[in-house]
Image (spheres, helix red, strand yellow):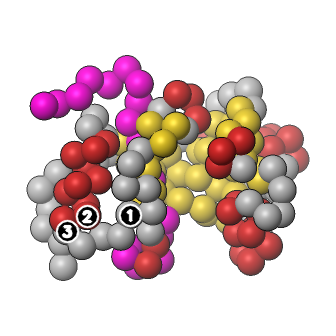
Amino acid sequence: MYSVTAHLPLDHVGIAVHSLEGTARLFELMAGEACSPPETLEAQGVRVAFAGSLELLEPLGPDTTVGRFLQRRGQALHHVAFRTVDIEAELARLEAAGLTLIDPVPRSGARGHRVAFVHPSSTGGVLIELVQHPREPLHK
C-alpha cells in the first residue's frame, strides 16, 4: 500500500492517564527513569511528563481530545511518535502517499519540539505523531 523510502526512528509512545501524579510511579518503575517535571500544553489541552520514552498525557478537562479519549477507552496507549529531522518534508511525503494529516502544518509540542499528527483513519486506527527536536538540523 505504501512505499518505504525513509526510516523514521521511534521517538516515544504516548499514554493517556487520568493523573500524572497517580501513574508516574508505575511508569518510572517500568522505564527505570524518573519522570520529567510536568509541562502544561494549553493549546493541546494536556499536562505531560516523560519517563524515558513514555509520554504521559493528562487532560486539562473532560472536553479536551485526551479527556474524550479517556472517557471512551480509559487509560491506554494514545499514540506512537516517530522522529524526523524535517517535519515539513515528512508531512508532504506522507500526504503524497495518501495518508490523512490532522496537522498539515507543524505545531509546538512538549520540550520545544515541533509536532504534527497523522489521522488514525488512514493508519489502521493508530494515531501517529511526527516529532522534530529543536536541536535537529534540517536536511535540505
Q: Give the residue type that dot 1 points to.
A: Leu
Residues at circles 2 and 3 in contact by the CB criterion of under 8 Å? yes
Q: Percent from the top left, x then y, of residue 92?
A: 23, 55
Question: Which element is circle 3 on?
Answer: loop
Which range of residues does the magenta coloring cover?
Answer: 122-140
Q: Quadrant of residue 38?
A: top right
Vertical arrangement, residue 108 with respect to residue 65, above or below:
above
Residue placed under numbered mark 3 in the picture: 97
Query: Is residue 60 visible to the viewer in this orientation of the structure?
Result: yes
Q: Residue at x 37, y 20 (%)?
A: 135
- The span from disc 2 to disc 3 (Cα, nearest Å) is 5 Å
Q: Residue at x 38, y 36 (%)?
A: 132
Quarter of the rendering occupied by the C terminus: top left
Q: Percent from the top left, x then y, of residue 87?
A: 31, 42
Query: Is residue 23 visible to the viewer in this orientation of the structure?
Result: no
Quarter of the rendering occupied by the N terminus: bottom left
Residue placed under numbered mark 2 in the picture: 95
Residues at circles 2 and 1 in contact by the CB criterion of under 8 Å? yes
Q: Give the residue type that dot 2 points to.
A: Glu
Residue placed under numbered mark 1 in the picture: 101
Residue 135 on the magenta segment = yes
Q: Residue at x 66, y 45 (%)?
A: 43
